[in-house]
Image (spheres, helix red, strand yellow):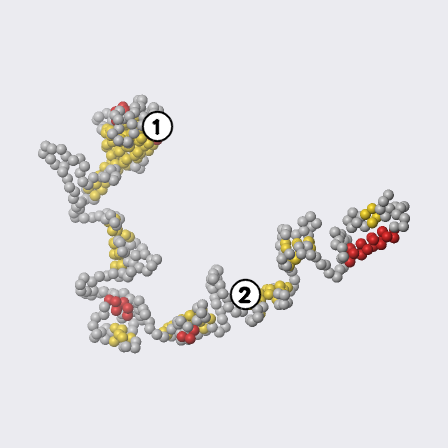
Amino acid sequence: MADGNTPTYNLILPEIDGADGTWGISLNSNLGSLDSLLSGGTALSAITVTGTVTTGGVTLGNNQKIKLGGDASPNLEIFESTGGDAVIRQVGTGNIAIQGQNGYLKNDADNALVAWDADHSELSWQGATGAGIKLATTETGIDVTGKVTCDGIISGANPFEIINNVATRIVSSAGEARFSVTDSGVSLLYGTTAADVGVPRLAITATGVDVTGTVDLDNLTIATDQGTAGQVLKSTGSGIEWGSDSGGNETLAQTLALGNTTGGTDIVLTDGDVITGTADPVIKPPAPSVGYGSPSIELQTSSGVARISTTDIEAKLWYGATAAASALKLQTTDAGIDVTGTVEADDLKLPLFTSTSVTTNGSLDPVQVPYASTQDTLALLAVDPSGNVVKGSQEGTWTFTKAQLDALTTTSTSGVTLLSAAGSDKAVIVEESNWMIKYSGTGTMSANGFEVRQAHNGASDAGITRIPSGQINTIMSGLPTGNPSYGFYSRDLPQYNNDGRSYVTNKATFLNRINTNATPANLISISIKLKYRVFDVDTF
């Protein structure tokens, strides 16, 4: 048998009972290979150790990793990347935890950038100047050494506080103070450079407010009585003081700008007082600021309850003894006025209209002006015995498509509700019916019809009015003059028993069809207009 070799490191395996004279050569070669493997001259393919390994150091090439964790999928890797970065990587589930009673993350100069001990942590700046701890956590929050630069500060549930042992300032981006707080007061400052903001323009003091410079006010309210009766605030050239009114009456603008002896900004009129002016004086609100609505003017009672108010586009009249009870009663709109409540008048005149409704022997134009050109479902106004204008007879209009008509029930005691029950002790009396047929071509239908019903004590399917199929066929028998075309059918009431029809209270009015024969294919819709009146047993 010839010599062999080991599978991993290719060590020589001398032939058993053979290789005379070559054992020494093979042994020396194997020992040299082992020396190279153990000294690092030749890379080990793998090593498995049970127990402790003591070494003077471990050197690995780029991207050669120390892996810690399970054999199949270790979760932690430590290595140097080919780009020169030293990497500690968590590659599995869980977190990386660095634990220690005291800990540091340092730069290459051995200066701590992040440090912690048992109860707090610190962030440091290690630049060429200003090195040191800049942020430290505390039991109540954080301590910052230096300035905080941020896009904004949002306070949580507790009030936001800025505390300084000496003074607190809010400065501009150029470092110029604009707001200053000390233990003795608050100051507001102004200036374009740091040099001209040393003197506060407004300071809060123990006695009030000190202002350096000119005060430009839209209004001035004097809280307590000042001066004597009849005096006004007047300019002295260097300020203002109380003085006599010998200089003449103030304008409204002057009064509102300087205040009055009552300490308010309002003009109060008592018996005999008037506001007069020349050349048609006008009360006018200021122009609105950008982003705000129209300004308004209000005329109020002495208790502050609005009676008249205006905006740029409307006027309103109010009524009520208190602000809580005050309600809008009249408001102007682009179409006229809206009134909430009852209008009481000695005389009521409606707009005149041009009429040619009287002639001796010629034809009349049936379209008189005005007529219901936009909505022809009308209610008649009537005057009750007390002189109130109320609704009398009124109308309702309903439109059903061909599909809806063909889907109506043939049950005579129910159907689609047109007028709901008016309620206890109220009856709905239908006075007149008109029907409009909309169609796109000729057509006929087998015997059928559509009936409006309302139950009474004698029959739960009592009819009021109907349009029979014969009338629909008559209308749709001629070619349309347009597409669509229209036809109309009017029916006297009641439909049976020319002597009349009985009604009872609290009954609904509904629509159904006589049988299941379908409507003509070219039928588009049928509209129903009912004229009706509601009677209340208590006011009949």
Tell me where residue 292 sits by quadrant: bottom left
Residue 503 placement, left or right of 149: left
Q: Disc 2, disc 1: CB below 8 Å?
A: no
Identity of the residue drawn at 22% across and 42% down = 390
The residue lying furthest to the top in this view is 446
Identity of the residue drawn at 26% across and 33% down = 530
The amino acid on which the numbered mark 1 sits, given as a three-letter code, is Asp
Identity of the residue drawn at 16% across and 35% down = 365
Which residue is the site of mark 2? 142
Q: Position of residue 335 (x, y in %)?
A: 24, 48
Which residue is the site of mark 1? 406
The amino acid on which the numbered mark 2 sits, given as a three-letter code, is Ile
Identity of the residue drawn at 27% across and 56% down = 311
The answer to whether residue 262 of the structure is visible from this angle is no
Category of crowding for the residue at label 2, using alpha-carbon neighbours closer than 10 angstroms: few (below 14), some (14–19), many (at least 20):
few
Q: Position of residue 164 (x, y in %)?
A: 49, 71
Query: Height in image: 376 above or below 406?
Result: below
The answer to whether residue 41 of the structure is visible from this angle is yes
Label 1 SS: helix
Q: Residue 149 or 117: which is nearer the viewer? A: 149
Tell me where residue 372 sits by quadrant: top left
Q: Position of residue 261 (x, y in %)?
A: 27, 71
Residue 162 placement, left or right of 219: right
Query: Height in image: 402 above or below 114?
Result: above
